[in-house]
Every structure is written in structure tokens, then in C-alpha cells.
Image: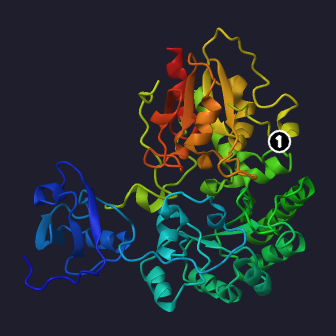
Amino acid sequence: MRATPYPALMPAARVDAVAAGSPAAHAGVIVGDELLAVNGEAVRDVIAYQIQVDGAHVELDLRRSGLERVVQVDKADGAPLGVELTSAVFDRVRTCDNHCPFCFIHQLPKGMRKSLYVKDDDFRLSFLYGNFTTLTRFTEADLERVVSERLGPMYVSIHATDPDVRTRLLRNRRGATSLRWLELILDAGIEVHGQVVVCPGINDGAVLDDTLLGVLDRFPALSTVGVVPLGVSAHNHEDEMRVHTLAEARAVVDIVEIWQARFLGALGRRLVYVSDEYYLLAERPFPPIDAYDGCPQHENGIGMARTFEAEVRAALAGDDLAGTGPRSGFFAWVDGAPADGYRAPRHTPSPNPSPNPSPNPTKLFGEFLGAEGPNSNKQFGESERWDVIVTGELGAAVLEPLLDDLPGRVRLLAVKNGFFGGNIGVTGLLTGGDIAAALEGQSERDRYLLPDVALSRGRFLDGTTAAQLPRVVEIVPTDGAALVRALRRSET
């Protein structure tokens, strides 16, 4: 026991899990312990924690049932401690003080979990989870830490390099100057990926052209820049925020492809990439997978379609390319990391379906898919059992061209997002309520496959679970090889 107690308000992390047989388990660490310090040093996040526990001899200051104790852990140098913590940041998350009119947090309906309304602008979560930060709350101390601890890759929201346009988009006067931190981070050799969320009539057209010129001039060391369309939910209250027209989407694709050629000539790499959604909006085919240069912004919806297709075709040919798309980053290996967040696994799939024994899906991008919609290339009889892939409208647009090649009898159930409404069509934002409505009235004989990207720790965004759906669903990892494996199980 320590004679001098730690202050009650001192940052502390709570132990969420202890691996059986691990060094921490042998030392007596249990679930519920509060971690106050490691090797005598208070740690504010899992980054500092990992640095401290990497050695062979680790001293943990714990609080258990109000009493403080010191636990000595001996292990091999670099070996994991065997602890999972409840959060990645032990002190307060640095929240965002921007007021971006396109911010999706502002477009959420009321009544959801409080944690979903938290806007972060924390450089640590940029490194840990791949969240994009605007750097408007970045400081000299933050820069020193990023450089000294080599906290890369980081992910930075650029949106515009013109100071006035960026200030308008962030609704924060610091938006005009905060990109100076980006220059300093890049000068230190830290890997950084940028993002431009395009709002029609504000930072598209000539402004987007100027932004990419600014990237070449000021930030050529950026690893990539992703150009993505804004999402507009039915709960949006910003009159100037609207969906793209077909012409606007095509113009964005054209500008990015022109700049890819310029960057390739000047830097030897394409640097800038447009999201898959833009190609769908523009009713144009996706570029070949080689044009994405390894898909470093896969999780930002850039190159997902071609990666998924490559995984499917490789699996059909007997190769397994699972995991070639998403990069789970720091949390793929760090000891103590909670399995939550943008870059962490969404769900631990099971080969067994859930124990629980609508509206027709709307056609999206009809001209892109063909006049009959996403199920047009397969005819199925009422007496046959089908494998049904439950997906969002954008997911259906990606999957439809692959249906004929998939093993077995496969059809799509494209779920319209009524919860968010607007132009929200990605599978990851589907709720249990909308999926339930789409499944209602579907055949009980069919087998339903649901990508795990729609779940986080077994729950949908509306808090419901797969067990509450009106049909049995099997949760499968969101990659092409996993889908092929799941479909082949149906054939045996």
C-alpha cells in the first residue's frame, strides 16, 4: 500500500480484461482495477502506457475498492502485459471547438447514446484510431510529443488551403492558421494523410483546384490526400449544405484525376485520391486497383470497392487476400488497447448465427447499376433457399457486379437508411431498426449475412443487437475473402 494516496481526480484507466495466463494475471491484476501510474509515472493515454510497459520489469500503481497498491510484473522484454483497458485516453478527450456546417455529429438525431455526440479534435485519437483532426487545438507541447514519440501516421482535415475558405468551413478563426502545424509535423518526417470534405458551392470547383495547388506548394510531403463528399442526413439544419448534382460529382472526379497526373509528374506519385462514393455519384467506373497505390485511405472509403473485388476474386481462385484493405494500425498490436474505434475491429465474428429465429430496398444509382436494380442479374424462385447479403445502398452498388461470380444462390437486400435519411447509404451507418424493417416479410428459409462493419461490440448505432432482428443473421467480417468463405459454407 502507498502511504501517499493519488488525488481522486488524477487521470486513471480501468482494467477491462486480463488475459488468462498473462504476466498481469500472474501478478494479480484483476478486472476493475484502476491504473494510476506505471513505473511511478502517471500516464494520460494508452500511448504513454505502452511505452512504459514495454520493458521486462513493470511497476503498476493500482486502486482497488478504494485502496491503493503496487504490483510488480516481470516478463520478457517487449512481451505484452496482458491487459485491456476501457479507454484509450485516460484524461479528458480534447473536444472540437470548430462548428463545421458539414459536421455529421451535428446531423445526428436526438436520443442516441451520449458518447456518439462527442466531437473530438485530439491528435492522440488521430494516431490511435485514424480520426481526422483539424489541428485548431494543437499546441507546441503537442508538436514536441508527436515528433519525439514519432506518432505517425496522423490524419489531418485540410478541406481548403485558402485561409478564408478554411475559416468559413471550420467556423473558427484558428482555421486560417492551424495548417502551419501540418507543415511542422511534415518537416519532422511524420507520416500524415490529409482529407478534403467537399461541400458543393463552397470548396469544390476552382477552390478545390486551388487547394490541390496549395498541397503541392506547401504540403508535398503528405502521404495521401483523400477527397470525399459531405454526408447530408435528414437532420441537417444547414441550408447551404446539400448533396452533389451529377455534374458536380463529375467535376470533382475530373479535377482530382487531373491533379493525380500533375502530382505523378512532379512528385512521382499520385498523392490525391477521390472516394468510391464519388465514382458512384458520377456514374463512372472505379479505377483499377493499381491506381490506388495500395489503398492507404481504404478506411476513408477510397479503394474499398476494388479491394473488395480483388479479395473476392482471389478467394474464388484459391488465394486469400483478407485484410489487404483496412489497416488496424496502432491498436493491432498495442498492449492495453481497447477494441473500439475507427481503426479497431468492429466485431468478433462467429460461424454460428444469432440465436433469434418491409419496405422494398430502393434502387440507388440506377443508371450505374442497370435499369432493373441491384438484384437484376439473378433470377430466383420462391421455393429456393438463397444466401442474402444485407447491406447499405452504396454497398449494394459495389456488390451487384460481383453477384454472378459468387458461389451459390446469392441475392442482395439493400437497406435504405431511414434512421439518418438524406444521402447516407454506407453499410457502417445502418441501424438495427432499419435492418429489421427490411428483413420483415423476408423469407424465413433464406440465410442472411450481415457485414460486421454495422456493429460495434455487438450493437448497432441505435443500441439494438442482431438477436433482436426478425430473422436470423450471420455476422461476417467486412472483406471479400470472408464473404466467399461464408458463402461456401452454405454449399457444404
Q: Residue at x 56, y 35 (%)?
A: 450
Q: Position of residue 302 (x, y in %)?
A: 68, 54
> Depth check: 263 or 397 in front?
397
Q: Residue at x 56, y 71 (%)?
A: 191
Q: Position of residue 38 (x, y in %)?
A: 23, 75
- Looking at the rendered structure, the secondary structure element under dot 1 is loop
Identify the colour scheme used: rainbow
Whether 232 is drawn above or below 359: the answer is below
Q: As drawn, which residue projects farthest toward the top?
A: 383
Would residue 65 be found to the left or right of residue 422 on screen? left
Whether 355 is drawn above or below 163: the answer is above
Q: Is residue 234 visible?
A: yes
Q: Residues within 10 Å of mark 1 (few under 14, many from 20)?
A: some
Whether 158 is drawn above or below 77: the answer is below
Q: Residue at x 37, y 77 (%)?
A: 91
Q: Position of residue 190 (x, y in %)?
A: 54, 76
Whether 445 is drawn above or below 77: the answer is above
Would residue 353 be found to the left or right of residue 397 on screen? left
Would residue 377 be found to the left or right of residue 109 on screen? right
Which residue is labeled 1 in the image? 365
Q: Residue at x 55, y 45 (%)?
A: 454
> Depth check: 267 or 421 in front?
421
* Quarter holding residue 167: bottom right
* Quarter holding residue 102: bottom right
Task: Quarter of the image for the N terminus: give it.
Answer: bottom left
Inspect the image, locate mark 1, and give the three-letter code of the amino acid beneath it. Answer: Phe
Q: As drawn, which residue projects farthest toward the right?
A: 247
What count of labels does the image hold?
1
Q: Is residue 319 visible?
A: no
